[in-house]
Image (cartoon, rainbow, N blue to C red):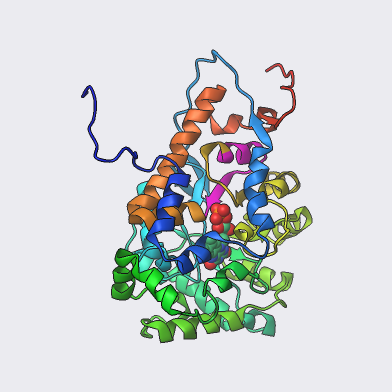
Amino acid sequence: MPVFRYRWSSRPGPLTVEDYRERARRAVPDMVWAYVDYGAESMTTLNANRAAFDRYMLKSKVLTGREAKDLGTTIAGQDISAPILLAPTGAAGLSHWTGELGAAQGAEAAGTLSIVSTAASYSFEEIAAGTRRGHFFQLYPWADTTTGRHDLTHAMMKRAANAGYTGMFVTVDVPTHGNRESEQKRGMGNPPVLTPARVLNAGLRPKWWAAFLRHERMSLRNLVDPGEKAGGAKTAMKTLNRQFRMMRPELNWDDFAWMRENWHGPLYIKGVLDAADAVRAVELGADGIVVSNHGGRQLDCAPAAIDALPAIAAGVGDRAEVLVDGGIRRGTDIIKALCLGADGVCIGRPYLYGLAAGGPDGARHVVEILKTEMRRAMTLMGVAELAELDESWLIPAGAPVPVVDR
Ligand SMILES: Cc1cc2nc3c(=O)[nH]c(=O)nc-3n(C[C@H](O)[C@H](O)[C@H](O)COP(=O)(O)O)c2cc1C
């Protein structure tokens, strides 16, 4: 063990998700940053997702002689090293040219799995070929679902099943697109608006720019047929427009029931904030619920995900798994989510920060940071096993510590 280490920079490597966020901010053009980091309208929900965690403190017991070592669990029938999945994020190729493939590889290296978006920059097949485990896939139900025909939706489901995806996550909180004005103001409209200043801004990130031009990961590969050439900006706009046309407010529970009938693996419904909706989904055969407000990107003023969680966990009980996402940036956030009834969490932006700053290894490191933080915090609390975490470990911030004898 050396007595000291010498470095040129006084800045240590990234130690936290926030460190990765700062690096990601510098790695990508402002337009891309607006797409990744901002939310809908006044960003009330985006900010609430974070603030809600701070309303809880964690109880701790001393001299327990206990240490948290194993965080392993099973979600949707798959063993993972910690209750953390990578949430689906479309067009991750904008954050880093390795996109969803790099994210899935990073997830695997950290012992977990990724939920690959329909709107990915890599096709389901490309990701399956570049990874070792069966990951999950996220479905945006298409407009044809509402016509009584389900050809497009069915084709997408079959495509994912053939490529080896083990679980399907249907996203239901996008009956129409969220109003992300801050993206539009920075040129991320449909189509993106380039100005000399924006081109210059991208040019100031030569590494990003060179990789972006070289690897052409602008288009959404699952929206073109496997044989169709997916390449430059023109195809990207064509596929994006196709996607926009396909979002429909008419989607309803009959469509969900149809999906249940036609998907034979684990089925999760993503984007639920209401306990009665969660119970209805379970009654229709959902294996899991993802409590989510889409990271504050859809309905602004929707409640913080963590505030919607307790009622949903209570309503669903043991009939289905419950995951939550939105605003998770620390291991202690995950502990709080588990105390409030979640079986696991998904992270969205945190791994995109890792990916933007450090490629697949950055995504892996972000998951490892969260795992290390979780293990340390649980040991400091005197908790050794995930199963011990329940509401009794939470104290409302600012309230006196309650007397509970264990
Ligand atoms: C850039 C970006 C793209 C996203 N794309 C999708 C998507 O294609 N499908 C989906 O179901 N959710 C999508 N989401 C929402 C995430 O799955 C997840 O719900 C959200 O990011 C969780 O919040 P967090 O970013 O604070 O962790 C996206 C989120 C971001 C940040």
Q: What segment is highlighted magenta in the picture?
A: 333-348
- Up the image or down, 138 lies above or below 18; here it is below
Closer-to-camera residue (161/49): 49
In the image, farthest residue toward the top: 63
Q: Quadrant of residue 402?
A: top right
Across and down, in percent, residue 370 comes to: 47, 41
Total numbered circles:
0
Across and down, in percent, residue 263 comes to: 57, 67
In the image, farthest residue toward the front: 197
Q: Quadrant of residue 144?
A: bottom right
Closer-to-camera residue (64/31): 31
Closer-to-camera residue (330/130): 330
Q: Is residue 16 left or right of residue 64?
A: left
Residue 336: say if magenta: yes
Across and down, in percent, residue 77 comes to: 51, 50
**Image point (42%, 69%), residue name:** 124
- Up the image or down, 370 lies above or below 239; here it is above
Q: Quadrant of ligand 1?
A: bottom right
**Image point (57%, 45%), residue name:** 344
Closer-to-camera residue (77/315): 315
- Up the image or down, 74 lies above or below 191; here it is above
* Residue 208 at least partly seen: yes
**Image point (50%, 35%), residue name:** 374
**Image point (70%, 75%), residue name:** 251
Viewport quadrant of the N terminus: top left
Viewport quadrant of the C terminus: top right
Residue 253: say if magenta: no
* Residue 104 at least partly seen: no
Across and down, in percent, residue 380 comes to: 52, 23
